[in-house]
């Protein structure tokens, strides 16, 4: 069998050295030692440009995209993927890759049960793929990593043989334009869409290819939640900048054409030293002294956060969680601190009515150091009558899966290990191969999966939501409540999840959502039959 059939040749370039040479599939102790703290997977990339002071730039609100048509009960959108220049740091021009010219991309507002069709046009210099993260999406629109949209100028001789990876006989590729259909037949929640091109997801997201897709339903209106200007989507990311203002990222191939992967010090993940919210560095937002709804997404490649909201007296405000990745909870959960792994989302209520007018609340990251300890700030600028409430039972439609309903239990180890001549990030001891079937499930089956980590791995399943049953043989943590699509495995931890594989048949994925791990082999195929 050739190396290409084994799936090694495209990652021979990742012949990991240094500390990673210690990480065999069973090297748990050395792997855990690399994670300096439980959420410390990754290495810091330091900016070479002067950075602005915190809490000076106003918080932007991502633009909501208008449909080009609403005929026939279908909302149709058009998005052009193109290069643009953004002012991220004040007075500095930064080239970015965008959906529709904005950083982050525009928000799609959808209704439960009403389909959206998005036509993407690729005017970037490399192939792209769009994945709606958390979407119950037919396989042909799920954004499989080899289902590429090729730019008009792309040729077989330019880069990888088909623009991003080894041969995949099932790849469905198009040139310049592709239409994605999202039925939105799922619970109301905040999803996000991002690039998912094989081997190059991490640098594409870093350059700007991410945006929000929010599904609404009538239930939210019944709950009297904060809305309008009091509902704030918060897309939290980290980046680093070169001296000329461009984004810094340690790609082995800056053109993202031929050679996947990052320079050796960053193989555990890339961490930037600038925290952005909705594309602005350490922004500030003026609020009334009433309850607000914060829709939080960690869109960082590898950085973990532990969020707390602290007033000027050092008092931590309550973060009342009413929703998770896949929608509203059965009952609210109150936190003072909230861990947030890459790709996770939380739906939070924060009451600024407990803060005097003129006061400030800082959203902080307890896992950060120096300037990355700060995320953003809220300034309470006026009094206002409270007309919302914290619902006692936000959701009544959570799936009733029980452990005894499961037709089988599977186990998967997420670990660094040997791959060809070097090391990579593996699932079950194997790097990703699009031509291989890893897991086959029957449509409608309920299964329990046991997921085991060496270092920190946020594990994401496409197509389905799941419930976390246990961590380390114990009960789930408070923030594990509700329906999830990403579970944050801590170093050395085993967690159990339960899910029903309903929705659609076809080829899907599960993978680590540390984007650098994902690009270096930590994905597997999931066939729903």
Image (cartoon, rainbow, N blue to C red):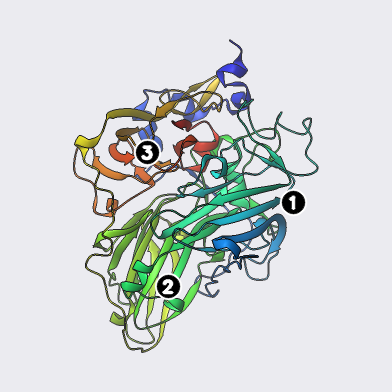
Mark number displayed over residue 231: 2
In the image, is 31 to the left or to the right of 67? left
- Extreme residue in the front direction: 72
Q: Is residue 253 above or below residue 4?
A: below
- Extreme residue in the top direction: 1
Where on the picture, by quarter, is residue 376?
bottom left
Q: Between 505 and 272, which is closer to the camera in this rendering?
A: 505
Tell me the quarter of the image containing the C terminus: top left
Q: Between 505 and 245, which is closer to the camera in this rendering?
A: 505
In the image, is 173 to the left or to the right of 202? right
Q: Residues within 10 Å of mark 1 (few under 14, many from 20)?
A: many
- The answer to whether the residue labelled 2 contacts the one labelled 1, judged by CB atoms less than 8 Å apart, is no
Q: Residue at x 52, y 40 (%)?
A: 139
Name the residue that disc number 3 marks: 501
Tally of numbered discs: 3
Q: Is residue 141 above or below residue 258?
A: below
Q: Position of residue 169 (x, y in %)?
A: 62, 25
**Mark 3 falls on what kind of element?**
loop
2 vs 3, front mark: 3
Mark number displayed over residue 313: none
**Mark 1 falls on what kind of element?**
loop
**Mark 2 falls on what kind of element?**
strand
Q: CA distance from mark 2 to mark 1?
A: 33 Å
Name the residue that disc number 1 marks: 123
Q: Is residue 63 above or below residue 367?
A: below
Q: CA distance from mark 3 to mark 1?
A: 36 Å
Q: Position of residue 362 (x, y in %)?
A: 39, 71
């Amino acid at each position: 069998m050739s190396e290409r059939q084994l799936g090694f040749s495209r990652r021979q370039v990742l012949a990991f050295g240094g500390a990673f040479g210690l990480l065999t599939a069973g090297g748990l102790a050395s792997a855990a030692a690399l994670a300096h703290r439980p959420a410390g997977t990754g290495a810091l990339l330091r900016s070479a440009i002067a950075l602005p002071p915190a809490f000076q730039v106003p918080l932007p609100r991502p633009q909501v995209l208008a449909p080009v048509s609403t005929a026939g009960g279908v909302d149709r959108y058009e998005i052009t993927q193109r290069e643009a220049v953004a002012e991220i740091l004040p007075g500095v021009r930064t080239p970015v890759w965008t959906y529709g010219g904005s950083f982050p991309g525009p928000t799609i507002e959808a209704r439960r049960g009403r389909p959206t069709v998005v036509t993407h046009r690729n005017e970037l210099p490399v192939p792209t793929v769009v994945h709606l993260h958390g979407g119950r999406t037919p396989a042909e629109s799920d954004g499989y990593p080899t289902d590429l949209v090729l730019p008009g100028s792309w040729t077989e001789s330019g880069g990888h043989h088909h623009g991003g990876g080894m041969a995949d006989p099932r790849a469905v590729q198009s040139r310049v334009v592709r239409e994605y259909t999202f039925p939105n037949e799922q619970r109301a929640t905040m999803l996000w869409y991002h690039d998912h091109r094989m081997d190059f997801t991490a640098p594409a997201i870093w350059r700007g290819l991410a945006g929000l897709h929010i599904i609404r339903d009538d239930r939210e209106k019944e709950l009297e939640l904060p809305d309008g200007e009091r509902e704030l989507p918060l897309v939290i990311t980290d980046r680093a900048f070169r001296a000329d203002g461009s984004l810094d990222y340690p790609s082995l191939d800056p053109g993202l054409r031929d050679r996947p992967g990052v320079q050796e010090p960053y193989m555990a993940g890339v961490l930037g030293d600038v925290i952005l919210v909705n594309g602005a560095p350490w922004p500030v937002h003026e609020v009334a002294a009433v309850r607000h709804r914060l829709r939080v997404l960690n869109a960082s490649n590898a950085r973990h956060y532990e969020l707390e909201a602290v007033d000027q007296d050092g008092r931590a405000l309550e973060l009342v969680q009413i929703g998770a990745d896949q929608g509203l909870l059965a009952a609210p959960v109150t936190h003072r601190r909230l861990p947030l792994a890459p790709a996770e989302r939380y739906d939070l209520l924060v009451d600024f009515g407990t803060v005097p007018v003129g006061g400030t609340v800082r959203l902080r990251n307890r896992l950060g150091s120096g300037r990355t300890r700060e995320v953003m700030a809220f300034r309470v600028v006026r009094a206002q009558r409270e007309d919302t409430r914290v619902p006692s039972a936000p959701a009544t439609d959570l799936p009733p899966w029980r452990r005894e309903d499961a037709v089988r239990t599977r186990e998967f180890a997420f670990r660094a290990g040997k791959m060809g001549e070097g090391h990579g990030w593996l699932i079950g001891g194997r790097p990703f191969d699009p031509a291989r079937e890893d897991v086959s499930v029957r449509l409608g089956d309920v299964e329990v999966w046991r997921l085991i980590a060496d270092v920190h791995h946020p594990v994401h399943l496409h197509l389905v939501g799941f419930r976390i049953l246990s961590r380390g043989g114990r009960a789930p943590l408070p923030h594990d409540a509700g329906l999830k699509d990403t579970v944050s495995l801590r170093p050395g931890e085993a967690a159990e999840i339960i899910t029903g594989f309903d929705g659609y048949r076809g080829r899907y994925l599960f993978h680590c959502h540390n984007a650098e791990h994902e690009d270096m082999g930590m994905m597997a195929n999931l066939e729903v039959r």
